[in-house]
Amino acid sequence: MKKPRLQVITLGCSKNTVDTSHLLASAQEGYEIVPEAESDAKVDVLLINTCGFIGDAKEESIQAIFDAVGRKKEGSVGKLLVFGCLSQRYKDELPGLIPEVDGWFGARELAPVLKALGVGPAPESARFVEGHPSYAFLKISEGCDRRCSYCAIPLIRGRHRSVPMEVLEQEARALAERGVRELILIAQDTTFYGLDLYRRRSLADLLRLLSSIPGIEWIRIHYSYPADFPEDVLDEMQNNPKLCKYLDIPLQHVADPVLGAMRRGVDMEWTKSLVKTIRAKVPGIVLRTTMMVGHPGEGRAEFEALLDFVREAKFERLGAFTYSEEEGTYGAANLRDSVTPRTKKSRLARLMEVQRGISFAYNQTRVGRTVKVLVDACTDDGILVCRSQFESPEVDGEILVKMTPQMGSDGSAMVGKFLDVKIVSADEYDLLGECQAVLE
């Protein structure tokens, strides 16, 4: 009997990507899974995993739902279901606004979604993985106990809940068996890992456990909160060759009035000291951070302090966004959004212009060096899309390498292999390289 066809559209962050892969692990026995890229495919069920973090993400999710409603009216979609952060946050309002959706589900539990699909749950560690990817995200916890003024995640995802180490080990081993070479650890705050289960911060212990898995060669840490940062993680990063010398640590700002209004639990002195400590303990580390402009409390002096800090710290990677008032948050209830949209936009442009210069200067220092890279993909014209330990997928630049005759003609066979590559040129984001050797 032919299986019904199921397609899932995933929006938002990498944590949503992991949620989708867990859900599909349960659904694959009862459904034929249609790739998300087939946007005009005829499917029996279309499921949208939404994001509801900030204004732009909410707009993207709403547009995706309307597009799906259009496909349903045209007859290419049978049942339309929506879950994730947007529907968790607006579960009372959305059904009346978009009645064409057949079911709305929140983000905290997948069981109701699986029930609507008519399938039972797979083991907690099970993942659906298409093809043979070189990397995979590993979500080590859910929710957040922080109460930053601007963030709605605790309202949407609830309290912090760590995934037991034994479950993460099983999940990572299964991913390694599928050819995954790099694990990217994600959570709303990876440094909080273990406090609820083991009564202490246990990220370093988890790193050692995952490092023992055959086939896993790189482990990368994202989304580390600066307050009470566990320095044993830095010791592990310095001494463990499988840990990428790379850390994603969203700092958000540096000026004391803004950090206080944000309720971040740190000040300028702490922030600067932490950055110096990280660089001293892990020489050569690449830091990625995120900054916010336009938060209440940010005047001209505070913004200039932020620019000075960015120039001083020279973050190799930096992303930024403007403050938006989110209903239900501390900021919306207690702070006045006093910075005009025009000023926010101008400050964002100035900050990113400073960062472009820093990124360009850093990439130029790499020209002429030979680095170990992991192949993520191959384009139709024979260009290998690669990364070193200093680039994280989907957020950082890439190292582009032309296929050589010694590699054969099948570029897809190179995915998941490591190469030694000499960097020959670079711009602010991407680098060009020449293959020196295929390592494995």
Image (cartoon, rainbow, N blue to C red):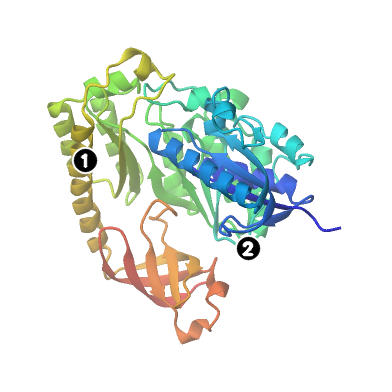
User: Seen in the image, is 218 located left or right of residue 341?
Assistant: right
The dot on residue 131 is 2
Quadrant in the rendering for residue 252: top left
In the picture as drawn, the residue positioned furthest to the right comes out as 1
Q: In this rendered view, identify the residue nearer to me: 348 or 257.
A: 348
Quadrant for the C terminus in the image: bottom right
Q: Nearer the viewer, residue 282 or 373?
A: 373
Q: Looking at the picture, how far across and down is residue 132, in whole percent?
A: 61, 63
Is residue 170 visible in the rendered structure shown here?
no
Which secondary structure lies at badge 1? helix
Q: Residues within 10 Å of mark 2 (few under 14, many from 20)?
A: few
- First of labels 1, 2 by sequence position: 2
From what the image shows, is residue 222 above or below residue 325? below
| Identity of the residue drawn at 68% across and 40% down | 167
At which x and y percent is residue 381? Answer: 44, 78
> Which residue position is annotated with label 1?
310
Instruction: Give the amino acid type for the residue marked by disc 2 in the picture.
Output: Gly
